[in-house]
Image (cartoon, grey):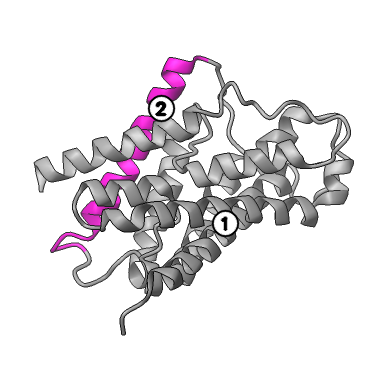
Amino acid sequence: MEVSLWTKCVFEFIGTLVLVLMGDGVCAATTLERSKAKGGGWIVITLAWGFAVMCGVFIAGPYSGAHLNPAVSVGLAVAGTFPWKEVLPYCVAQMLGGFIGAGIVYIYYMDHYKASTSNPDGILGTFCTMPAIDHKGMNLLSEIIATCVLVFLILAIATNGNTPEVGLGSVGAFPVTAIIMSLGMSLGGTTGYALNPARDLGPRCVHALIPLEGKRDSGWSYSWIPVLGPMLGCVLAAGLYLLVF
């Protein structure tokens, strides 16, 4: 059965919403005051982000291919495995999903956000990424390399001999989950591994809009890096894929 572009975008929206809800949710759970998960640490965060992606993939995979990330959509289009005419609608759906998902996180943890106003940096970190060391050039390079690895591996998964006839949904969700976990543990320490403009920019806008007393600025001077870095990384990954495969 042919799936309409509208249906694909609806599932990209829902899948990205769930991804951000559960991903930003673990950041809130391990950061905010009086949360039972406070102090859970980096391993908990990276594992949960991997599972968050898996949940989004299970929802959207059968209908849209479960990109859930503008960098993935652009990377697949550059590699010739996804139609360019669907890139913009997918990206809009993903960005909206990320925004709404982060908004739900704020509502869910509202009491804990109010109890955490003494930690404005931590509050921002539950919505979006910020660098461990503010060095814009290296921060950008980190996002380019990490996203390049992500998109290259997603493209490689679909090649014959790995998971033939399986897209990013179904069984393909499990290797993608492992990739996200591995990237977080190995390459996430510099910037928090955004890898995904929808995961970062939409939630950053939510942080800017929430009526929380004592919050800090939303890090707009850094916000271009988790957008530009993944977009450059996905193009690099597609080029490498075409060269190698």
Please name the amino acid that badge 2 sits on. Answer: Ser
Identify the residue at image location x=39%, y=73%. 63
Residue hosting label 2: 142
Residue hosting label 1: 97
Horizontal side of 214 relative to 220 (left or right) equals right
Horizontal side of 112 relative to 105 (left or right) equals right
Measured from the top left, where is residue 152 in percent x and y? 26, 45
What is the residue that sits farthest to the bottom in this orientation? 1
Assign the N terminus to one quadrant of the image.
bottom left
Measured from the top left, where is residue 119 in percent x and y? 80, 30
Is 1 situated above or below 169?
A: below
Horizontal side of 166 relative to 194 (left or right) equals left
- Regarding residue 9, the answer to whether it shows in the image is yes
Task: Identify the mark nearer the N-term, 2 or 1.
Answer: 1
- Asked if residue 7 is among those painted magenta in the image, a careful observer would answer no
Assess disc 1: are there few (<14), some (14-19) or many (≥20) residues with their C-alpha within 10 Å of its C-alpha.
Answer: many
Identify the residue at image location x=44%, y=70%. 6
Measured from the top left, where is residue 215 in percent x and y? 81, 31
Please name the amino acid that badge 1 sits on. Answer: Gly
Is disc 1 placed on a helix, strand or loop? Answer: helix
